[in-house]
Image (cartoon, helix red, strand yellow):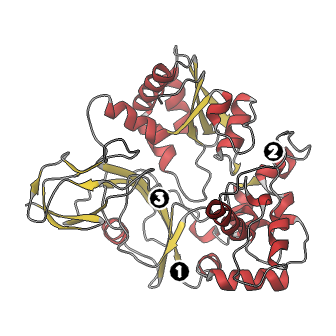
Amino acid sequence: MSARADVVLANGAECEPLLHKDAAVMEHQARELLRGVLLTMEAVGARAGIVGIKAKNHAAVEAVETACAGTPVRVHRLGDYYPAGDEYDLVYTTTGRLIPPGGLPLHVGVVVCNVETLVNVAAAAESRPVTHKTLTLAGAVNQPTTVTVPVGTTFRDAIEATGGFATNRPVLCIGGLMMGETTEDLDTPITKTTTGVVVLPRDHPVARRKLTPPTAQNAIGKSACDQCRYCTEYCPRYLLGYAVEPHQVMRSLAFTATGTAYWNQWAALCCACGLCTLYACPEELFPKEACDQAKAEMRRAGVKWSGPTAVKPHVMRDGRRVPIASLMKRLHLQAYEHPAPWQPTRIEPRRLVLPLKQHAGVPCRPRVQPGDTVRAGDAVGEVPEGALGAPVHAPCDARVSSVSDHIVLERLP
């Protein structure tokens, strides 16, 4: 926000299946969202603001359009496809501008922020820190819901407080099934950047695939990929005109010893949406994960993008968009397709776990020691001078139990 741009774009696309957090934020905090957009426009010198919302989220669209009436901010209604929220795709869909390969929205005069980030910008302008997080709890839970909880609440506490698990072997897909982190640790804490969680039984096909070790993923791909190109033909970045070809990244597995470090520039512009792995591949291989590994090896080797810079959208781009309904069927999620309405449930866990790194940049330095008493809103972690990061604040009055790479707070009575 220290840069200059002429458009501020609020990303409310929220295309991960079963997650509804952004829709709830827009419906219930539309005025705060507008305030955040206008403040950001002022900061970057923008003349226009856009809020991208899926047209199916009728209540959110109505609330935001009402709030934006008479302002330079407009709503752009999006289709119900995945991944509508990829910033390259969203910028092109809403402004007609193509971000240069390897570039940022800023390179075409656009600043993109998540809608909840912009709500928090409005709060920051009033000196209110981020101490609570809105998220969706979905999947194999007894009561799918969208709630606001103190940062540092564990997923176990949040789900048990809202109805409990509907499986005795839960797997957490934190941030969604397509792009999220998968873990069996129910005591993982909710952070400032958590959007939601989809709970799956351990024997669900997606859970089994997500928990397949990388060495096995590589071995399967090396032996079974027949270069059908479906992964590439459905890739949203390829269809937008960028040089992303997951089938060529899979090809590199055949020319390396399994498990050997490799890199492949056809992965460099991959957005990690997961469509190739979880939707397109007829053999259920792992092209997205191969792209992830290739990008990591390129970073370690210091390899920068050197491919074509001309971008021209594919003529079949619109026809090959993947509807959320089709994606849900492919992922075997029909049994979990329930509303997760926002609930004003007050959750006050006795114990909170605050990671000192839950944001971009460097970890915070602790400002407290075990035994200290803190009040709600106090900064317990600070950003090192001159570094990029964000402070961490106590969500409630509490006593500091321990300090390591995270701070554990015990709520005061």
The numbered mark at residue 316 is none
Distance from disc 2 to disc 1, alpha carbons, whole Å, reads 35 Å
The numbered mark at residue 196 is 3
Marked residue nearer the N-terminal end (3 or 2) = 3
Residue under numbered circle 1:
201
Marked residue nearer the N-terminal end (2 or 1) = 1
x and y, in percent, of residue 301 in the image: 66, 63
**Residue neighbourhood size for the residue with mark 3, other residues' Cα within 10 Å, grouped as few (<14), some (14–19), many (≥20):** many
Residue type at numbered disc 2: Leu
The residue nearer to you, when weighing 261 against 194, is: 261
Q: Is residue 319 left or right of residue 4?
A: right
Residue under numbered circle 2:
240
Q: Which quadrant of the rendered structure holds the C terminus?
A: bottom left
x and y, in percent, of residue 363 in the image: 36, 56
Marked residue nearer the N-terminal end (3 or 1) = 3
The residue nearer to you, when weighing 107 against 413, is: 107
Q: Residue at x 67, y 72 (%)?
A: 332
Q: Please state which of the two labelled residues, at mark 3 or mark 2, is closer to the viewer.
A: 2
Residue type at numbered disc 3: Gly
Q: Quadrant of residue 103?
A: top right
Specify whether residue 321 is in view.
no
Q: Is residue 45 left or right of residue 296?
A: left
x and y, in percent, of residue 208 in the image: 61, 82
Q: Is residue 175 above or below residue 97?
A: below
Q: Are marks 3 and 2 in contact (CB under 8 Å)?
A: no
Q: Quadrant of residue 18?
A: bottom right
